[in-house]
Image (tube, rainbow, N blue to C red):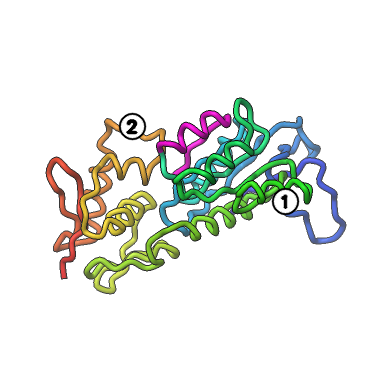
Amino acid sequence: MTPALQIRAATRRRGPRRAAPAWGNAVPPGPAGRPGPARFVMPVSSRPGHHGTVRVLVVEDHKVLADRIAEGLRDQGMAVDVAYDGETAMEVTACTDYDVVVLDRDLPRVHGDAVCASLVAGPGRARILMLTAAAAVGDRVDGLNLGADDYLGKPFAFAELVARVRSLARRSPSAPPVVFRGDVAIDRVRRRVSRAGRPVALTRKEFGVLEELAAADGGVVSAEDLLERVWDEHADPFSNTVSVTVSRLRRKLGSPPPIETVIGCGYRLRDTR
């Protein structure tokens, strides 16, 4: 069961209906159900995601909130990096291709509006979701006029944030919802894989690796690229994480093995029909 999220200063309702869970100004309950101290501490859902590999950058100067959002999005099967100020956000977006940037406006060093304008003017394809306490109509209009693709005010329901991130990721240039490589079918939306009509149960990372290999359309994908696209910035580049995941993936897909190792280069998904 998804843990309940507490809302600070939430208006109590009489009867069976309850206020929707909200993030951004959350307070854990104290003894006997009384509110605890005002702080940003929020449980996250452990329910698996349904969208495939989505690369997200969370830009938020409140570190506890930023880390909780990142943890929750990773729990939904996404690869997530975090920047705690606008200057860092501009640096990482210059060298990493993100699908979605979740962007606070009131950031230190470089204001969120300047980050948004830079992303819109740059060559990247990232969609921008502004997530901020400035949620009045005028604020939303200003943010959208700056080039943001969507706008969500704080406090917010985490389920809505996930839905908006997925919606924006679908707008980014991407492969078709279902990709076929030989007798392997990859459903990116439902996160299902089958081979010759036989369902194949994969973990999130195994699915992400297979999805990236399929997107290369027969090309070779290096272990470094797989680590960057399927995992996040905290992954150890010197580990054997990718090779172990590929090995498990090969076993699950069966014979003849559709994943070929190109020595010194990486991996390729073959048509084995």
Q: Is residue 21 above or below residue 41?
A: below
Task: Specify the segment rendered in magenta.
Answer: 78-95
Neighbour tally class for label 1: few under 14, some 14-19, many 20 plus, Cα within 10 Å: few
Query: Between 130 and 124, which is closer to the camera in this rendering?
Result: 124
Query: Between 11 and 270, which is closer to the camera in this rendering?
Result: 270
Separation of marks 1 and 2 at Cα, in angstroms: 41 Å
Q: Which of the marked residues, 1 or 2, is nearer the chain's N terminus?
A: 1
Q: Which residue corresponds to mark 1?
A: 141
Q: Residue furthest right?
A: 14
Residue 66 placed where, x, y %? 58, 36
Asked if residue 121 lies left or right of residue 210, the reply is right
Kind of residue at badge 1: Val
Residue 212 placed where, x, y %? 32, 53
Residue plotted at (79% across, 37% down)? 35
Residue 200 placed where, x, y %? 31, 63
Query: Between 200 and 227, which is closer to the camera in this rendering?
Result: 227
Q: Is mark 2 on a helix, strand or loop?
A: loop
Q: Is residue 78 visible?
A: no
Q: Which residue corresponds to mark 2?
A: 236
Q: Is mark 1 on a helix, strand or loop?
A: helix
Q: In which quarter of the image is the N terminus?
A: bottom right
Neighbour tally class for label 2: few under 14, some 14-19, many 20 plus, Cα within 10 Å: few
Q: Is residue 234 visible?
A: yes
Q: Residue 54 carries which label?
A: none
Asked if residue 88 lies left or right of residue 108, the reply is left
Residue plotted at (78% across, 41% down)? 8
